[in-house]
Image (tube, rainbow, N blue to C red):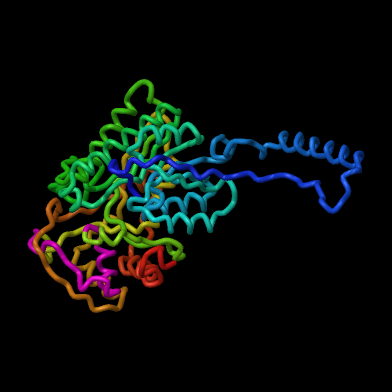
């Protein structure tokens, strides 16, 4: 899903090819029918003229030109967990989508699923590129007529960010700047930015509202806040005063597509840093010996962390509603959560019930950069965007995700 400055690969665009032509030659016939050849040549010229006058005939990609009634969205990190689900929803709602991903953490398997679901020309294209390569990003913008950007691409593990902070500042903050520069250069004025509740750090009071002071305590949250600050400064400049921006700060994402088409498939080497749901499913499948719960001495009812778990289907619904409500010259900032806090122990019990597995739990010391309690107040997004979480049953969300995991024990590689 995310892009990383360590991989400076060249952007490679997969262009749709238009193959057309007519073969009037027949090797079985004698080549002495001059009149018929002349007629065939005349017909060929007429066909070419008609085709060139047709709006569907062009030497350029359909993605490179704007069409009335068609909104073309660039989804960065669209091969990742959240990005692929967002792409699915956009395509289902008849948007045109371009995915840009370097596959450092995304899955080409997810892209192939989307391509099979939406094979029609002009619906979906995938571009392999790294947002850390400014020349490649500028080229992509110059060759495509984007109406809006949904910027998901990012490394996104709290624990990893404490071990590799510079990577996070490059990947999140610097790459966001590169995207904004390209948007400004090519007059793309709508941005839906994927942010995080980690920008709040460990607030003094709960629930978290959008005006809660942002005091992030780990590099992941700090890098996201820096990116937010850059976006806000960017929109305040006179040249960019017509920007339509939505910043969505969401909480802990779980679940998968209700129809079982997509799921979460983190790379094996990243399991240690991944979401608790992924670790729980790995334990249920026997991929790992058990589940490690980090921290039992937090000031909470059972000593484990409390989080607000938001289903990925609800999350992408918030993104699509934000895109529909984005207005030139305005910035909207919203928390995306259920408003309910659940402890890690509660989560583990719900996971065991969903999987039907008896999972061994090992309790360890706190993970660096973690905070005790975080849950949202989603009142503002309900009021402004008419959005509210629909998939709020933790057990049901986990059961749906488990169904996909059982069918794909090796991720998209086992599809």
Quarter of the rendering occupied by the C terminus = bottom left
Question: Which quadrant of the figure has residue 230?
Answer: top left
Marker count (numbered): 0
- Image vertical order of residue 241 relative to residue 268, above or below: above
**Residue 276 in the figure: left or right of residue 141:** left
- The one nearer the camera, 332 or 13, is 13
Q: Residue at x 47, y 54 (%)?
A: 88
In magenta segment, residue 191: no
Return the x and y of residue 136 as percentages of the image width and height: 40, 36
Asked if residue 286 is among those painted magenta in the image, a careful observer would answer yes
Q: Would residue 385 be found to the left or right of residue 169 on screen?
A: right
Report the residue at 26% width, 33% height from top: 229
Q: Position of residue 393 (x, y in %)?
A: 33, 66
Residue at horizontal 80 percent and vertical 39 percent from the top? 44
Question: Is 230 situated above or below 266?
Answer: above
Which residue appears at 29% of the width and 41% of the height? 5
Q: Is residue 53 above or below residue 313?
A: above
Residue positioned most to the top: 238
Residue interval drawn in magenta: 273-299
* Residue 410 x/y as whole percent: 36, 67
Residue 37 point in image, percent of width and height: 87, 40
Foreground residue, 303 or 21?
A: 21
Query: Is 195 or 332 nearer to us in this picture?
Result: 195
């Amino acid at each position: 899903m995310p892009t990383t400055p360590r991989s400076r690969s060249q952007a490679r665009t997969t262009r749709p090819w238009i193959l057309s032509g007519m073969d009037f030659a027949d090797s079985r016939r004698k080549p002495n029918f001059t009149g018929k050849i002349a007629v065939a040549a005349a017909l060929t010229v007429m066909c070419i003229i008609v085709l060139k006058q047709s709006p569907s005939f062009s030497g350029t990609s359909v993605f490179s030109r704007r069409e009335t009634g068609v909104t073309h969205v660039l989804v960065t990190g669209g091969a990742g967990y959240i990005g692929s689900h967002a792409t699915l929803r956009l395509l289902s709602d008849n948007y045109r989508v371009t995915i840009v991903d370097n596959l450092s953490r995304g899955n080409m398997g997810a892209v192939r699923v989307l391509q099979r679901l939406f094979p029609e020309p002009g619906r979906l294209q995938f571009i392999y590129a790294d947002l850390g390569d400014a020349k490649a990003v500028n080229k992509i913008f110059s060759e495509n007529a984007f109406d809006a950007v949904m910027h998901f691409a990012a490394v996104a593990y709290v624990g990893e960010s404490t071990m590799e902070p510079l990577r996070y500042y490059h990947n999140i903050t610097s790459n966001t700047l590169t995207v904004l520069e390209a948007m400004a250069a090519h007059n793309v004025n709508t941005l839906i930015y994927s942010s995080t509740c980690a920008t709040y750090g460990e607030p003094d009071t709960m629930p978290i509202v959008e005006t809660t002071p942002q005091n992030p305590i780990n590099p992941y949250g700090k890098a996201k806040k820096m990116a937010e600050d850059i976006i806000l400064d960017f929109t305040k400049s006179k040249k960019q005063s017509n920007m339509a921006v939505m910043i969505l700060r969401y909480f802990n994402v779980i679940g998968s597509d209700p129809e079982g088409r997509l799921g979460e498939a983190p790379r094996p080497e990243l399991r240690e840093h991944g979401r608790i749901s992924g670790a729980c499913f790995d334990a249920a499948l026997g991929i790992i010996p058990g589940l490690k719960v980090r921290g039992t001495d937090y000031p909470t009812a059972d000593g484990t962390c409390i989080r607000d778990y938001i289903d990925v289907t609800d999350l992408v619904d918030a993104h699509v509603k934000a895109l529909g409500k984005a207005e030139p010259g305005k910035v909207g900032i919203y928390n995306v959560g259920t408003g309910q806090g659940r402890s890690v122990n509660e989560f583990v019990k719900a996971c065991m019930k969903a999987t039907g597995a008896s999972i061994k739990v090992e309790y360890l010391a706190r993970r660096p950069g973690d905070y005790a309690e975080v849950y949202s107040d989603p009142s503002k997004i309900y009021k402004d965007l008419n959005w509210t979480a629909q998939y709020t049953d933790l057990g049901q969300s986990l059961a749906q995700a488990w169904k996909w995991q059982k069918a794909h024990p090796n991720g998209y590689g086992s599809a």
